[in-house]
Amino acid sequence: MADRLIFIGWNRPVVGREQQAMKLFQKAMEYYSKLQSGGKIESFEPVMLTHHGGDLNGFIILRGESKKLAEVREESTFVEYSIEAGYCLEGFGVVSGYTGEGMKDIFSRWSKLIGS
């Protein structure tokens, strides 16, 4: 069961690189589908936000187990797509996070730190 996640976020395509960004998104969706069917991730969810004046306009969440997600982050395809995304998307970033049982673990550690 998923206890970790990879959050992949961006603002908007770099002007003049919109077509490249669209093609990359399509390739990434196929790649994440393969990761899911191969059992490397549990699920993925792409999200586009409505206009709100902020600098986060879309993101994808990959859910899975800690060890498997760490392996995914080192796969050449993931690294290459991340490099390309940094080239054609403003504000692109990749962040690891916690979900499910991982939330219980991280909050337990935090609770100990604050003396609760």
Image (cartoon, rainbow, N blue to C red):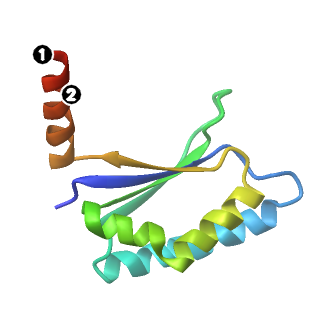
Q: Pick whichever of labels 1 and 2 is earlier in the sequence.
A: 2
Query: How would you rate the neighbour count of disc 1 (Cα within 10 Å): few for under 14, some for 14-19, many for 20 or more?
Result: few
- Name the side, left or right, on which 32 lies relative to 106: right
Residue 111 at x, y percent in the picture: 15, 24
Query: How would you rate the neighbour count of disc 2 (Cα within 10 Å): few for under 14, some for 14-19, many for 20 or more?
Result: few
- Name the side, left or right, on which 11 lies relative to 96: right
Give the residue displayed 22% in from the left and 58% down from the top.
2
Q: Amino acid at mark 1?
A: Gly
| Residue pointed to by mark 1 | 115
| Residue pointed to by mark 2 | 110
Residue 15 at x, y percent in the picture: 87, 51
Does residue 109 lie above or below 23 as drawn? above
Residue 91 at x, y percent in the picture: 68, 44
Give the residue displayed 10% in from the left and 16% down from the top.
116
User: What is the quadrant of the N terminus in the image?
Assistant: bottom left
Secondary structure under badge 1? loop
Q: Amino acid at mark 2?
A: Trp
Task: Looking at the picture, tell me which residue is in the foreground, 30 or 63.
Answer: 63
